[in-house]
Image (spheres, helix red, strand yellow):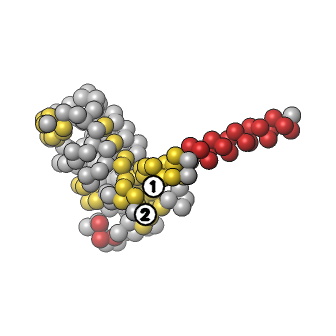
Amino acid sequence: MRKNGFLVFGIVFLTFVFLGCDNGTTSQQTGDPGQTTDPGPTWSFQFLTIYEGYEVTEVLITGFTHNSTGFPTDLVIPSTYDGLPITSIGNSAFSSRGLTSVTIPNGITSIGTSAFNNNYLTTINIPDSVTFIGESAFLNNSITSVVLRYETAFDVHTTFDRDVTITRRP
């Protein structure tokens, strides 16, 4: 029985070494308070670094935490973390945070499920680099129109509210 316990531990350990997900406690970067129009609260972005072997291959932004009351309402997503490009915005990363505007940098390729739902966004600029937008990513906002590349994959019925005008471009 003891051998089986060591075997299970070894398999779990090797899975983390080779798949290499670092969820976080060290993958946190303090957001620049200048990125918000409300200078009161201090907050931090949270990141997930994805490894292949010993090399970081991808950085995913998973949301933010706050050290006092409130969150920023005007959010500027950083384009890099620790010198590495941020490529994805995680599922529910900024859901129900009271956002009124968000700036997504070019270089982001994926926006996760429910990433920005239940906010107060009225406009959104989707960069050309985005190739995938998850279900409900911008649902329950006040966005009236959005322009996307033809190559951007998304569910027309669930990604945005039903009254949003979607324009596709090359």
- In the figure, 70 relative to 94: above or below? below
Q: Return the x and y of residue 124 as percentages of the image width and height.
A: 20, 48
Check disc 1 and report its element: helix, strand or loop.
strand
Mark nearest the camera among 1 and 2 is 2
Q: In this rendering, would 34 be left or right of 60?
A: left
Q: Is residue 126 visible?
A: no
Q: Hey, which residue is sitting farthest right in the picture?
A: 1
Vertical arrangement, residue 69 with respect to residue 147, above or below: below
Q: Position of residue 13 (x, y in %)?
A: 68, 45
In the image, taking residue 142 as reference, residue 2 lies left or right, namely right
Q: Nearer the viewer, residue 166 or 144?
A: 166
Q: Is residue 137 above or below residue 158?
A: below
Question: Which type of secondary structure does the marked residue at label 2 adopt?
Answer: loop
- The amino acid on which the numbered mark 2 sits, given as a three-letter code, is Asp
* First in sequence: mark 1 vs mark 2: 1
Alpha carbons under labels 1 and 2: distance apart: 10 Å
Q: Residues within 10 Å of mark 1 (few under 14, many from 20)?
A: many
Residue 39, by quadrant, is: bottom left
Residue in the foreground of this view, choosing between 100 and 13:
13
- Tell me if I can see residue 101 in this picture: yes
Residue at image mark 1: 47
Q: Quadrant of the C terminus?
A: top left
Task: Give the residue displayed 29% in from the left and 66% down from the top.
Answer: 35
Which residue position holds label 2? 82
